[in-house]
Image: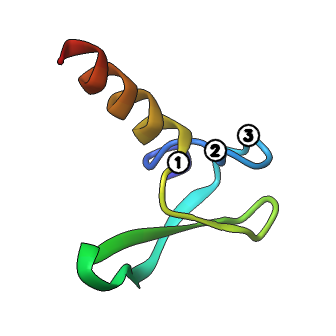
């Protein structure tokens, strides 16, 4: 299932997997992802960052 959740913004690896939820306080819960390549966590893999930028450009 490599690449299903996008690529790592740190190393560019497509070995990103879901790794629980991150509590953002008043902003609520946010999905957290773990890169199996560099072992770093992110809340926004590259695939999602591209979708966010596309949505903002439509506004």
Give the labeled residue for mark 3: 12
Identify the mark nearer the N-term, 3 or 1: 3
What is the x, y in percent for residue 50? Answer: 44, 28
Write the residue at 28% across / 78% down: 29
Q: Nearer the viewer, mark 2 or mark 1?
A: 1
Q: Residue furthest left?
A: 59
Give the labeled residue for mark 1: 45
- Front-most of residues 28 and 4: 28
**Disc 3 crowd, CA 10 A, few/some/many (<14, 14-19, 20+):** some
Which element carries disc 1, helix, strand or loop?
loop
Q: Which mark is residue 14?
A: 2
Which of the 4 image quadrants contains residue 16?
bottom right
Which element carries disc 3, helix, strand or loop?
loop
**Disc 1 crowd, CA 10 A, few/some/many (<14, 14-19, 20+):** many
Residue 13 seen by the camera: yes
**Quadrant occupied by the C terminus:** top left
Tags 2 and 3 touching, CB below 8 Å: no
């Amino acid at each position: 299932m490599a690449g299903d959740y996008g690529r790592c913004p740190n190393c560019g690896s497509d070995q990103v997997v879901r790794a629980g939820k991150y509590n953002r306080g008043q902003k609520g819960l946010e999905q957290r992802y773990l890169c199996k390549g560099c072992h770093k966590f992110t809340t926004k893999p590259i695939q999602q960052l591209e979708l966010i930028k596309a949505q903002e450009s439509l506004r």
